[in-house]
Image (cartoon, grey):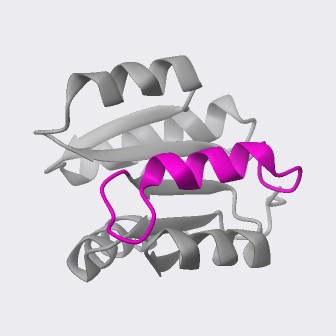
Amino acid sequence: MADQGHAIRVVCIEDEPEMIDLVKLILMRRGYDVIGAMGGHEGLEIIEQVQPDLVLLDLMMPDMDGWEVYQHMKADERMKDIPVIIVTAKAQSIDKVLGLHIAKVNDYITKPFGPSELLSSVVRVLQEAGIEAREA
């Protein structure tokens, strides 16, 4: 876990560079340390290396979907307690979203999302995990 002297570390796993850039833009302005990962395999490697405070995980990725990444995380002692916010497209099927509730993900947001939507989700999930997060 991050101690108060360090920036809160977020890994954003996405297959669209523009989305990673957007998340970085929104969160880095608030003092978060954001690391982008292109796709699920790279994402899991980065999570293992940096042990982030939070993971933003896109569901729809070609190499390994977010669902698989999530299951890998939950099955791994070193990753299972890291909070996850799922990012899903509006057109995502409802059974995926129902699956998220069953799987106990911390939260999910739908694309396209605004800065305040992303920030409030991040802050809420971090607070639930016992990490003080800055909203302003």
Q: Residue at x 38, y 74 (%)?
A: 24
Relative horizontal placement of residue 128, taking residue 114 as reference (left or right) = right
Q: Residue at x 32, y 66 (%)?
A: 26
Q: Residue at x 27, y 82 (%)?
A: 17
Q: Residue at x 56, y 79 (%)?
A: 42
The span shown in magenta is: 59-81
Relative horizontal placement of residue 99, taking residue 92 as reference (left or right) = right
Q: Residue furthest right?
A: 77
Placement of 129 over or under 18, stated as above or below? above
Placement of 16 over or under 73, stated as above or below? below
Placement of 84 over or under 42, stated as above or below? above
Rendering quarter of residue 81: top right
Rendering quarter of residue 2: bottom right
Q: Position of residue 1 (x, y in %)?
A: 83, 55
Q: Which residue occupies the foreground of this view, 14 or 69?
A: 69
Q: Note whether residue 55 is visible.
A: yes
Relative horizontal placement of residue 42, taking residue 49 as reference (left or right) = left
Relative horizontal placement of residue 76, taking residue 105 as reference (left or right) = right
